[in-house]
Amino acid sequence: MRISRLAVIAGLLTLLGCTRPADYLYESTHTTVNHSFDKKIVEVTAGNGAVDLFWLIGGMLEQESNFTAGADQFMQAFLPKNLDWRMAVVTDNTFEKPYLGMPAVFDHNSPQPGPKLVSAVSKAVYGQDEEMIFDPIIKNLNTYGAGFLRPDAVLAVIMTNDDRDSSSKTRYASDMLKQLLAMKGGDATKIVVYGVFGATDLNCDPDTIDSDWNYHGSEFEKLVNLTGGQTLSLCDNTFGNQLAKIGDNLSQKLETSRIVLPTRPDLKSIRVLFHGVDLPGGPQDQGGKWYFDVNSNSIIFYDLSFAHSNTESVTVQYADQ
């Protein structure tokens, strides 16, 4: 059977296209644009290593040993990074006061930070379990935020529980993000949310958690995705090591120049322009200036040497997924 030359060429192109790394974008198809905005170089530049880390620990007595061991491993991995951090710990109701870091500051200058965090996490696990996540986060940040939140720091929220959210005031991820943005002057690059959950679809036995529920499709998942965070399973046998990876991920975010997108993009539609000219995406050794990181929903720049001043801007355009 004869095969046309065009068919052979088309087949080769298809095979070559399939070998491209998933995180790299090489060209835009210039499809319909839903989003177009400018970012000044000074807003894209990597942060100063400052992070305000807010822990919400659900009341889960059965997970006490898991959490205390995990918090200890987290601090052992996190402290050597020498970040400018402060932390607070609360539990999953709106009437108990914070266990650590509010109103008195707990930060990188505090003595014995590891044992103090472990102790606070252990107490929070024994807190009155109301299965509320969004409401206590907002209430405590509104009440104590003036002494906890720093304008130049990234706000990192770690929320944990083994059941659905029972919040009554803030029930949706979009509302939650709106309120967090208001606290950070509308700068989405200064917000990241992580999840540590016990759920049936995160490999947990329903008999070992508070109810048979799924994380995927929840408002928790939506919020984590919107901020480019990560989610871990409470039921992972290497939970402590996994929790330490949050510190690694957070450290990376503080050290890279990035633009977090507010929604999930059609990957082929993303364009980054400087003075109206497309900046190429893809591997740096092939001339790429940036790539898209699916996990953090971010455009990440290898460097910003193409700009001559922090007051210059890049333009981002893309279509929704």
Image (cartoon, rainbow, N blue to C red):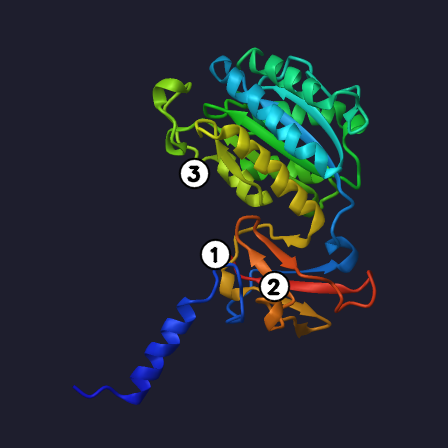
The crowd level at tag 3 (other Cα within 10 Å; few <14, some 14-19, many 20+) is few
Q: Are the residues tagged 3 and 2 within 8 Å (C-beta)?
A: no
Q: Is residue 47 above or below residue 120?
A: below
Q: Is residue 23 left or right of residue 122?
A: left
Q: Which amino acid type is marked by label 2?
A: Gln
Write the residue at 71% across / 64% down.
Answer: 314
Q: Which residue is mark 3?
A: 217
Q: Does residue 159 appear anywhere in the picture?
A: yes
Q: Which of the 4 image quadrants contains residue 27? A: bottom right
Q: Which of the 4 image quadrants contains residue 283? A: bottom right
Q: Which residue is mark 2?
A: 317
Of callouts 1 and 3, the N-terminal one: 3
In percent of width and height, residue 214 lies at: 40, 32
Q: Which amino acid type is marked by label 3?
A: Gly
In percent of width and height, residue 207 lies at: 35, 18
Q: Which mark is residue 321?
A: 1
